[in-house]
Image (cartoon, rainbow, N blue to C red):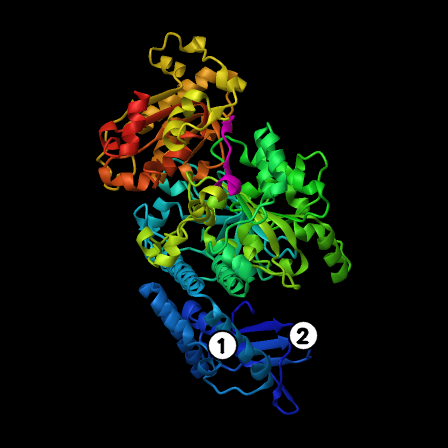
């Protein structure tokens, strides 16, 4: 694009239309429409008159520039088609009905889609058979399979709509893509969803490889100051949008938007890796101010819809297995070895080997589900060189842990990681597929390297968006960590994929997780995702917010449960006193301590605290400190008395540990609201203890999967209605299990301190039981 935006060229590597006019090459209609929509964006967002601008298509096969002349009639046709698609999707999510969706999808066939009466070779030979072929497959499904398909279709469509529109409240604020232009600056700041008043300090946007810019906050406020505006909800690897913001009205709808990912973020600077180099320096003026907000993508939803398509085409025996129409099978030849095994991890690994279809492993906090159980499975399956293994996780952090476990195996097995560079720990980037294949001279060499590698690793999202992998590889086993955080349609495309020879691309699967910890993130309400079809409820599918792990777990019969499921029971994280309440209430007393040194040692009070009457609290393993409700804040998202209590405790913990204090290992502080995080950080800053400024103060979601020697939990509940947000409760065998509370309590290795308003907390039965246990 020219600097004045009056002319731009779109390069195409494919073919133009060589048959529309005999002897003449014309741009394809869809390419012309694309250019017209670019012009519409410039007109409506940038106030550029389309009559003055010129757009060209450049096909690399032909030595000419083809002008895409403005035709506002064609733009209107394109917008009208878009609106009809949106209306259909809106109708599906609004009705949220199996019958409605079945009727809408039954209307899609080659006759109804072909509104323009196409008769060319592309339509007759390829498009029409594909459309009708899918419709026939859908009609051939059994009643329960159709109900399953339509229910998941509704769920995905509803979640996509909610993600875009923000038709939901989260902590009392807007969510979704629409919040980019609907939320005020104050709302964005409170939610930590914007960085603004940024100036460019390093501009490498024109670099051919790894183009990036570095921006810094202008003025004296850093990203980690004690105001809500300065507590951004951004992390390295996050997808973002960058745009000029020199006035209050500037936003993504009226400025040029640059997409990228956060490469690094510190207290003062943010480094952004741009998706595309920008050779024109005028598009990023050095004297302008900029804003950064989170970006959203349809890639996850695309993968889920592709997964639904894979389900329709899946082998019948795999569909029957997933829908509980046949029981899982097992190799009884392992029975004697399983009975004779004395080590828990050997026992678990043998059961995983014996499973022919699937195996479920519950890994409560601190039981070594990744560092020990997953690692031993990897070693065992890898001993047989014919075994091809696929490792999956929900987060990149957990994927890093899998890579760490693989790297610690003595035989150092080779593996390839699917995914992008930034979210991957630098220690494992050499295994990224782009780096492994970097020196391949041709496609054949790349295919050979992929074929010879026995282990592949990636997030469920990254693997789902690489369906071509399953045309090249058959995996004997897929091992899924964090399985209870992955929605059923997010795994469907992987479990239903087929190789080119028609076999299941994944032979069997092992799901590792804990349904009593934090579940998958879903924006729609439980009422909206609830399943009402009796046939689906009969196979354990009661709510689509639940994971496949949970459904299979609920649906296991007594005989199957003994073979297809097990739970790790020995935990090496928490001191028995810290583990007492979650062990008894959430795990039925099944957890045993490994009696590691930190689980058996006595607490010794620091001499510096012996004369401190309040310092004696450091001799308690678990303690609750009552606070007073703070009704001064209308939102209820801060509690000043708790912030003061937390800061005082932090100081005593720092004194207690002395030179052994480590900001990343010793202390962590959990609280539900960003406003309270800011308040606690402010109180800690006032202590003038530099090391304490580097401890993690965050929500429970950020702590899942991590641990600290000491955890302080500020409940920050000022009104009874806030308990609904604080907790995430399920019921199992008549017992209430608060998944958020379980995660918060089990992050501590040696000591756990809590502060809250007792009379409010006691209105919740689980919290009442907790206070009774502590007192």
Q: Quadrant of residue 763?
A: top left
Q: Determine the residue positioned at 32% across, 24% down.
A: 645
Give the secondary structure at mark 2.
loop
Q: Determine the residue positioned at 55% across, 74% down.
A: 7
Report the span colored magenta.
561-572
> Is 45 rendered above or below residue 652?
below
Position of residue 278 measured from the top left corner of the image (x, y, whole percent): 58, 60
Position of residue 215 measured from the top left corner of the image (x, y, whole percent): 51, 47
Q: Determine the residue positioned at 76% across, 54% down.
A: 439
C-alpha gap between disc 1 and disc 2: 20 Å
- In terms of depth relative to the viewer, which is nearer, 329 or 501? 329
- In terms of depth relative to the viewer, which is nearer, 51 or 21? 21
Tag 1 residue: 36
> Is 519 rendered above or below residue 632?
below
Q: Is residue 633 left or right of residue 647?
A: left
Tag 2 residue: 60
Q: Contact, CB < 8 Å: mark 1 with mark 2?
A: no
- Considering only order in the chain, which callout, 2 or 1, is on the residue closer to the N terminus? 1
């Amino acid at each position: 694009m020219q600097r004045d935006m009056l002319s731009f060229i779109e390069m195409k590597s494919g073919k133009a239309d060589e048959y529309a006019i005999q002897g003449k090459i014309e741009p394809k209609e869809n390419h012309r429409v694309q250019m017209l929509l670019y012009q519409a964006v410039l007109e409506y967002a940038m106030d550029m008159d389309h009559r003055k601008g010129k757009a060209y298509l450049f096909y690399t096969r032909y030595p000419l520039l083809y002008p895409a002349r403005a035709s506002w009639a064609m733009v209107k046709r394109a917008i009208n088609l878009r609106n009809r698609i949106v209306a259909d999707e809106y109708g599906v999510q609004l009705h949220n009905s199996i019958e409605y969706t079945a009727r809408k999808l039954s209307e899609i066939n080659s006759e109804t889609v072909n509104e323009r009466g196409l008769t060319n070779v592309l339509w007759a030979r390829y498009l029409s058979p594909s459309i009708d072929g899918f419709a026939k497959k859908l009609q051939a499904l059994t009643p329960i399979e159709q109900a399953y398909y339509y229910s998941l279709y509704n769920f995905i469509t509803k979640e996509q709509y909610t993600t875009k529109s923000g038709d939901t409240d989260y902590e009392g604020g807007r969510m979704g893509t629409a919040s980019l232009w609907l939320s005020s600056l104050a709302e964005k700041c409170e939610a930590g969803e914007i960085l603004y008043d940024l100036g460019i300090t390093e501009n490498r946007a024109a670099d051919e490889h790894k183009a990036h810019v570095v921006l810094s906050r202008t003025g004296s406020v850093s990203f980690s100051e004690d105001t809500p505006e300065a507590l951004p909800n951004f992390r390295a690897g996050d997808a973002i949008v960058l745009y000029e913001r020199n006035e209050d009205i500037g936003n993504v709808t009226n400025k040029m938007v640059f997409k990228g990912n956060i490469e690094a973020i510190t207290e003062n600077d943010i480094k952004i890796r741009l998706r595309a180099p920008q050779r024109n320096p005028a598009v990023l003026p050095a004297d302008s101010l900029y804003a950064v907000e989170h970006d959203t993508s349809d890639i996850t939803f695309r993968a889920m819809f592709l997964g639904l398509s894979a389900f329709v085409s899946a082998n019948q025996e795999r569909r029957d297995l997933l829908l509980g129409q046949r029981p899982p099978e097992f190799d009884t030849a392992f029975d004697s070895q399983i009975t004779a095994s004395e080590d828990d991890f050997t026992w678990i690994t043998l059961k995983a080997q014996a499973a022919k279809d699937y195996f479920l492993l519950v890994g409560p906090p601190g039981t070594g589900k990744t560092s020990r159980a997953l690692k031993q499975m990897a070693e065992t399956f890898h001993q047989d060189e014919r075994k091809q293994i696929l490792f999956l996780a929900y987060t990149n952090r957990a994927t890093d842990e899998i890579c760490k476990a693989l790297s610690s195996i003595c035989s150092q097995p080779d593996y390839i990681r699917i995914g992008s560079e930034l979210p991957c720990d630098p220690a494992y980037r050499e295994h990224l597929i782009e780096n492994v294949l970097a020196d391949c001279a041709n496609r054949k060499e790349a295919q050979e390297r992929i074929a010879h590698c026995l282990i592949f690793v990636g997030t469920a999202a990254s693997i789902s968006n690489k369906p071509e992998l399953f045309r090249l590889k058959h995996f004997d086993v897929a091992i899924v960590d964090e399985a209870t955080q992955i929605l059923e349609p997010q795994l469907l495309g992987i479990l239903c994929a087929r190789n080119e020879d028609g076999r299941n691309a994944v032979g069997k699967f092992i799901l590792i997780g804990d349904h009593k910890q934090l579940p998958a993130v879903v924006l729609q309400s439980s009422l909206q995702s609830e399943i009402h079809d009796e046939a689906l409820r009969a196979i354990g599918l009661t709510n689509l917010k639940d994971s496949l792990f949970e459904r299979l777990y609920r649906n296991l019969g007594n005989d199957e449960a003994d073979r297809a499921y097990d739970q790790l029971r020995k935990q090496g994280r928490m001191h028995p006193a810290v583990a007492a309440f979650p062990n008894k209430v959430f795990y039925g007393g099944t957890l045993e301590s490994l009696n590691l040194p930190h689980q058996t040692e006595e607490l010794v009070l620091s001499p510096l605290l012996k004369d401190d009457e309040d310092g004696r609290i450091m001799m308690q393993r678990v303690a609750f400190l009552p606070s007073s409700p703070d009704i001064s804040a209308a939102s209820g998202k801060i509690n000043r008395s708790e912030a003061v209590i937390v800061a005082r405790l932090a100081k005593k913990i720092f004194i207690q540990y002395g030179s052994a204090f480590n900001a990343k290992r010793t202390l962590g502080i959990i609280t539900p609201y960003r406003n309270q995080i800011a308040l606690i950080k402010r109180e800690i800053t006032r202590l003038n203890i530099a090391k304490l400024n580097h401890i993690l103060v965050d929500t429970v979601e950020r702590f899942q999967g991590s641990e600290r020697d000491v955890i302080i939990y500020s409940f920050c509940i000022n009104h009874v209605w806030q308990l609904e947000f604080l907790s995430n409760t399920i019921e199992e065998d008549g017992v209430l299990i608060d998944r958020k509370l379980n995660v918060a309590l089990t992050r501590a290795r040696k000591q756990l301190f809590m502060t809250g308003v007792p009379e409010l907390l006691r209105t919740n039965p689980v919290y009442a039981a907790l206070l009774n246990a502590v007192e």
